[in-house]
Image (cartoon, helix red, strand yellow):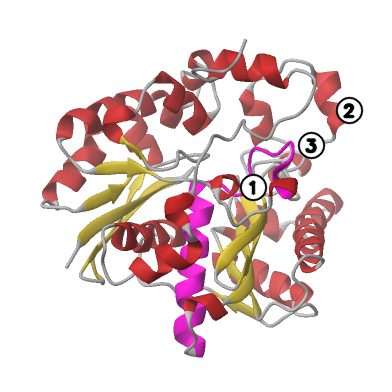
Amino acid sequence: MSKVIGIDPGTVSFDLCGLEDGRVFLDTTIPSAEIGANPQVLVDVLKAAQPLDLVIGPSGYGLPWVNIEAFGEQELFLFILADERERSQVSVLGGMSEMVSMLKTSGLPVVFMPGVIHLPTVPVHRKANKIDMGTADKLCCLALGIIDQAQRHHIAYNATSFIYVEVGGAYTAVMTVQAGQVVDGLGARAVGRVIDSLGAMDGELAYLLGTFPKSVLFSGGVASMTGQPALSPEAALELRETVPAAHAAWEALFEGVKKSVAAQMAIVPNVREILLSGRLCRIPAVREELADRLSRYAPVHRISGLAHVAKEAAQGAALIADGMAGGQYAGLVETMRLKEASGTVLDYIHVSLADELKRKYLRGAAD
């Protein structure tokens, strides 16, 4: 018996999925701008669902099982990897500190969860000089992927094997599950461009830019390449066949995803399927193009999920919350070894300024 809620803090919306004894009882979405302006909106939705056994809160880049009571300034930084000045320039980030303060005083059983890099199932050598191998919400997608494949094929969690492609508007990730465990991941800054972001950045470009605001990471995507940064995915897609810049932009996106999948196939060459989800995969033409390009590697399947409104990450967060609370998905959490997650996203940085970086942002870092 458990009653839990999972939250997905998306760029466009905050999605909430609630499970009671394994059944969906909450399936809703709230515009991110609304929560950024008034975080109490989120708290009110959670309170209305009480009593709750567990809430997996918005966890950003990952905070392995940090309780809301222990959430401080270091946790806030590791959550969003942006300083106070940067936070004030993005509405959702600016409201995050206020939201956490409200959650602290709410009495709600909120915990934050890890990202891919925190998992013991990912070999250390794959983590070297990485920060984002799949944020916490992307890890939630993998949990949903395991459930989806296990149920469709009537197999055990530890028999699942797939490459998961999550194609969002600002973030994309390509991650691999083998024997029900996450073994590798390419996060948003390692995969090709999407609508609102350039994805991977050439190191020489980063050097030439010098110190640059985080907003730069949310530029250079498909929309920027068309010369119209505010363009919606649907509008950009309409230009693909008539505007050369738009054609090149979409080709960069599709090819980038394909190259990332091919790279993951080098690690696990015999996956059962490639699973698709994300905002862009809800556009039929984009989904069909990706499926056509990726089908040479393995059968392609779009995640169906448990809910109708909340996105895949919120559903996965609810599954994990249920498992952590000892519900019917406890076996999922055990198979994925989620409880063993530990560390911070800065633990595997080995560049020349790594020690300075850790001293600046981590409590107890050696001088």
Circle 3 is placed at which residue position?
201
- Amino acid at the residue labelled 3: Met
Residue nearest the viewer, comparing 244 with 270:
270
* Chain part drawn in magenta: 126-153
Q: CA gap, disc 2 to disc 1?
A: 21 Å
Label 3 secondary element: loop
The residue lying furthest to the front in this view is 366
Q: Is residue 157 visible?
A: yes
Horizontal placement of 119 versus 295: left or right? left
Horizontal placement of 245 versus 228: left or right? right
Circle 2 is placed at which residue position?
204
| Mark 1 surroundings within 10 Å by alpha-carbon count, few (fewer than 14), some (14 through 19), many (20 or more) | many
Q: CA gap, disc 3 to disc 2?
A: 8 Å
For residue 133, the mark is 1
The N terminus: image quadrant: bottom left
Residue nearest the viewer, comparing 179 with 116:
179
Q: Is residue 193 visible?
A: no
Dot 2 or dot 1, earlier in sequence: 1
Q: Is residue 127 magenta?
A: yes
- Amino acid at the residue labelled 1: Met
Q: CA gap, disc 3 to disc 1?
A: 15 Å
| Mark 2 surroundings within 10 Å by alpha-carbon count, few (fewer than 14), some (14 through 19), many (20 or more) | few
